[in-house]
Amino acid sequence: MSTAGSPARPAGWLRRWLAGRTLRGRLIAGLVALLFVACAAVGVVTYESLHGFLLNQLDSQLAAASSRYTMCVDGPPPGQAPDPGDPDDQPGYPDYNQADPMACANTPGQAQATFSAAISSSTLTAKVTHGECALTAADEATLRNLPVNGRAYTERLYSLGADYRLVAVRGTGGTVLITGLPMTLMTDTLDNVELTEIIVFTAALLLTAFIGTGWVRLSLRPLRRMTATASEVARLPLASEVDVPHRVPDAGQRTEVGQLGAAFNRMLGHVESALARRQSSEARLRRFAADASHELRTPLASIRGYAELARRHPGTLPPEVEHALSRVEAESARMSSLVDDLLLLARLDAGRPLESKPVDLTRLAIDAASDARAAGPGHRWRLELPGGPVLVQGDEQRLRQVLANLLSNARTHTPAGTTVTVALASSPGRAAAELSVTDDGPGIPKGLQPDLFERFVRGDTSRSRAAGSTGLGLSIVAAVVAAHHGTVAVDSAPGRTRFTMTLPLLPGQDLSAEPAEPEEPEDSGEVVDPADPMHPADPVHPPDGEGG
């Protein structure tokens, strides 16, 4: 059953079909469809016109044949003398007023296969010119029901195996005289015309599709060049310093494609200018951060030195002075950490190379987990490590800082009792190691995750410094990992937050061995001995809290 929305279905299907095709395909399809409609219209009009013409011609022939048959059976109209030139009146032809109407079936002038029949009372006789005709019951019923009005009708005569154009007139004495002409010649002519139209129009459609494809391709060549240029520009690393030398060839502005190409070139010029200005601004900002960080280290060192010197004053310091000196020392230490972080980011932005030597990530994970346990005894710390060392090429101190930042985030932003797991495994399908830090804390808000590795982004948007956060910890993580040709990602939901760091392995390593049993410091006492010589000799800056 149709519904109110049914008429919209073809349009929706057509829109979906067109949406999945290229502009070239749609133009060619439209061209062929228009030509198909035009050919179909021409074919229908031609067929119907020819059909009407042939049918009128056949009806004229049928009227003449009916007139000859009627005159043969009933004689000429009253007052009309026999025509001496009429072959019917010549010797050897039947005379008028024949008793048997079938004798007039062979009246001279009748075409081959002309059908003649006479109905008088209950008698029906029929004959075909120069032939015999044995009517079937269906044919007799058709002839008896034929309207006697002198108009032509198309009926099927099964005894003759063809469609006939029949006309019935009333003769003298109430006799009904029926004359018919076969439509075989007419239908054969129409079939030939129809077949010819199909062949010609199909060839025209194929030829048009072939030539139209070439023409559309040629017309859309400037658009394809524009697409190729846009693709080349899209592949450029626009995040760094970049030159945009690509331009669309000038095709003139007389056409829409040429105007689009000119506008596209102007847009590329504006993009190139904007990128140059942005790059210049970022370069000045990096230089400022590096210079300011470098210059601030000296006064900060002086502040800390004078604070220590004041503590060496002989005698007992007043409590308020003692408190003021402790705050000066704490804040100067925190400021020194922030300056060092800014200086590190500035150096990484400038592309300065880091130290490059083999680093054992297994040893690094054990040391970092041991330090994190000492700093956060209220958390559960777990290790999932392979059975042997995992070596990467890089800067051990910076990688240690990266892992310390991630563990500090997990400790700072999760409640006591949270389980934090440090896992090391191979990256599927890649010669890389995956070092992950996973906790079962409350998770990171969805709105914060896209910008989590940007600078000065904190989970707490207030200006409080209670946790010592500067919003640089995860940006340092991302910058250091990128400098080691690796990647870092976060996947967080309530109850599970996972930071994954992927670094390329040194050649010749196989991490397919079974991992070691997870270590739980609460049960075993310590992950490693704090006096282990593999502990870092240099202090690690206090990490920031952007994690989950």
Image (cartoon, rainbow, N blue to C red):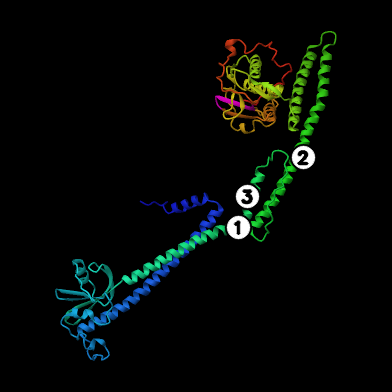
Q: Residues within 10 Å of mark 1 (few under 14, many from 20)?
A: few
Q: Nearer the viewer, mark 2 or mark 3?
A: 3
Q: Name the image quarter holding residue 364.
A: top right
Query: Outermost residue, right direction?
Result: 314
Q: Compared to 263, does 379 lie above or below? A: above
What numbered label is drawn on residue 280?
2
What residue is pinned by disc 3?
227
Pick the front one: 86 or 315: 86
Q: Given the image, on which type of amino acid does mark 3 rest?
A: Thr
**Labels in figure, total:** 3
Image-quadrant location for residue 544: top right
Image spot of residue 179 (x, y percent): 25, 76
Q: What number is the disc on residue 522? A: none
From which residue to which does the magenta span run?
493-504
Residue carrying label 1 = 218
Residue 499: in magenta span: yes
**Residue 495 left/right relative to 13:** right
Distance between mark 1 and mark 2 Cα atoms: 42 Å
